[in-house]
Amino acid sequence: MSRRRQRRSLKRALVALVALPFVLTLVYTVVPPVSTLMLARWITFRPVERDWVPLEKISPALKRAVVTAEDARFCSHNGVDWDALGDVIAAGPTRGASTLTMQVAKNLYLWQGAGWVRKPIEIVLALWVDLVLTKHRVLEIYLNIVEWGPDGVFGAEAAARRAYHKSAASLSSGQAATMAAALPNPIGRDLRRASSARSRWAATVAARMRRGGADLSCVSG
């Protein structure tokens, strides 16, 4: 193959790679997606435990707990919380700038780590995800693909069954707050083991929920 043909082939491959997330987002309006972490585990012959369930079959308490803990302005932003992002730029990295939509974009299409290299791409993809998908669908995808424990546990249903031996639909408010509190570090805050950090954050999430929690008016079901 000539060098010119090689360059053309490389350009086509790069264009296809860049276009893939934008095309897949359209597919994911109706098809249950998998995350890059799930794919990596399958490729390396490690187990993945995930049972996709529609948003309507997830406890309202868990939806509210997760949005309260992870992205309180979920219903009011366009995929990116620009105020929180501005605070990070001004004051340095702090938890809270990554919205649920940004986490969905990262989990579906990008890699873990090297946040400042990844973040600009994540922002662009989050804006596209928010444009194409409803808030209902974004939350549904998030709750079904997020890593929620060691040994390949992904999604609310698998996590609830592993931790509490019940479905995600049957979780109590306290259990929902505990599950939400595990998300910053689902491996270190394994739901089946005691964790003082998780317990403290769960208590904070539960208190915020009692005060009204996050606005979920943009999510049906």
Image (cartoon, rainbow, N blue to C red):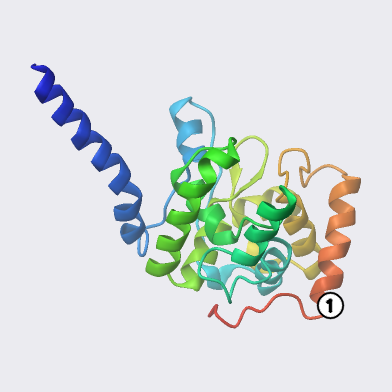
Few, some or many residues within 10 Å of mark 1 (<14, 14–19, 20+): few
Q: Nearer the viewer, residue 99 or 161?
A: 99
Tag 1 secondary structure: helix
Q: Is residue 185 left or right of residue 139?
A: right
- Compared to residue 91, the image places residue 54 above or below, namely below
Q: Residue furthest bottom?
A: 217
Residue at coordinates 72% horizontally, 38% vertically from top-left?
187
Q: Nearer the viewer, residue 141 or 172?
A: 141
Q: Is residue 68 left or right of residue 155?
A: right
Residue at coordinates 64% horizontally, 72% vertically from top-left?
73
Which residue is tagged 1?
210
- Compared to residue 13, the image places residue 99 above or below, namely below
Residue 116 percent location from the top left of the image: 58, 41
Q: Nearer the viewer, residue 148 or 75?
A: 75
Residue 60 percent location from the top left of the image: 66, 74
Residue at coordinates 44% horizontally, 72% vertically from top-left?
134
Is residue 207 visible from the viewing direction of this image? yes
Task: Tell me which amino acid carries mark 1.
Answer: Arg
Image quadrant occupied by the C terminus: bottom right
Is residue 167 visible from the viewing direction of this image? no
Residue 124 picture quarter: bottom left
Q: Is residue 115 left or right of residue 8?
A: right
- Compared to residue 111, the image places residue 19 above or below, namely below
Residue 205 percent location from the top left of the image: 81, 65
Residue 63 percent location from the top left of the image: 65, 69
Image quadrant occupied by the N terminus: top left
- For the image, the number of numbered tags is 1
Q: Is residue 92 left or right of residue 126?
A: right
Residue at coordinates 68% horizontally, 63% vertically from top-left?
66
